[in-house]
Each structure stands twice: as C-alpha cells, then as structure tokens.
Image: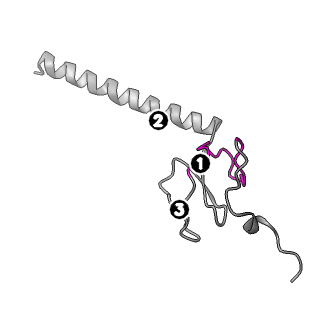
Amino acid sequence: MATLSEITNAVDAMKTTRTANAANVANAANWKANPVYRLCPRCFRAVPAHSSEYYCCNDGEKLLEGCPRCHTPIHSPFARFCTLCGLAFAPLERMRVKKGG
C-alpha cells in the first residue's frame, strides 16, 4: 500500500504535468494569435520561431531572430523591413528586381 508521502508526490507530479501541458497549449494558442518568425536575410525564407532551425537550409545563413537594430520580433513571414525602426533585413541591392537581361 502507498504511503501518504508517495501519494502526495504522485499528485504533485500530476499537477506539474497538467500545468506544463496547459502552458504548451497556451503557447501554441499565443503563437497562432501573434506568430513570430525567423527570417533568412539572404533568401527571405521564413520559419516559425518555435522551430529548431537556426540556419537557412537554402544558403546556410544564420536566421534573424528579430530586427538586428531594435530587436523587435518578426511577425510576418513576408517581412523585408522592421515594423518599428524601418531597418532593411537585407542589403537593398538584394531586394531590387533586376530589369532587362
């Protein structure tokens, strides 16, 4: 038969697991409401910030976690400029479309 101490420890473990699961659900819901991305400054590939990717699989560049100047999170996978300070996430010559041949 289990002792009172063992039962208390088991209940505490269940509470901890329930709290951790609730936090994971809350984080997922928060991400859907306010997504954050990592962005490649070379090819502009975007991945969700909660992914395990830190380097671009296309060109090996380190993904931006936020604006390099003001550290504002990137909330759009299509972002090319910081929404707070206006910094370009890549040199402007990379963003320009070449005309002609």
Residue nearest the observer in this picture, 5 or 32: 32
Q: Position of residue 29 (x, y in %)?
A: 58, 34
Dot 1 amino acid type: Gly
**Which residues lie in the magenta part?**
65-84
Label of residue 62 in the image: 3
Q: Which image quarter holds the N terminus?
A: top left
Q: What amino acid type should be assigned to the residue bearing mark 3?
A: Lys
Residue to which mark 2 is pinned: 24
77 to 27, vertically: above or below: below
Magenta-colored stretch includes residue 79: yes
In the rendered structure, the answer to whether residue 66 lies left or right of residue 82 reads: left
Residue in the picture at 50% in, 58% down: 54
Task: Name the outermost residue toward the top.
Answer: 4
Name the residue type under label 2: Asn
Query: Which SS class for mark 2?
Result: helix
Query: What residue is pinned by disc 1?
Result: 66
Q: Main secondary structure of the magenta part?
A: loop
- Quarter of the picture containing the C terminus is bottom right
Instruction: Tell me the distance, in whole angstroms, between the alpha carbons under discs 1 and 2.
Output: 22 Å
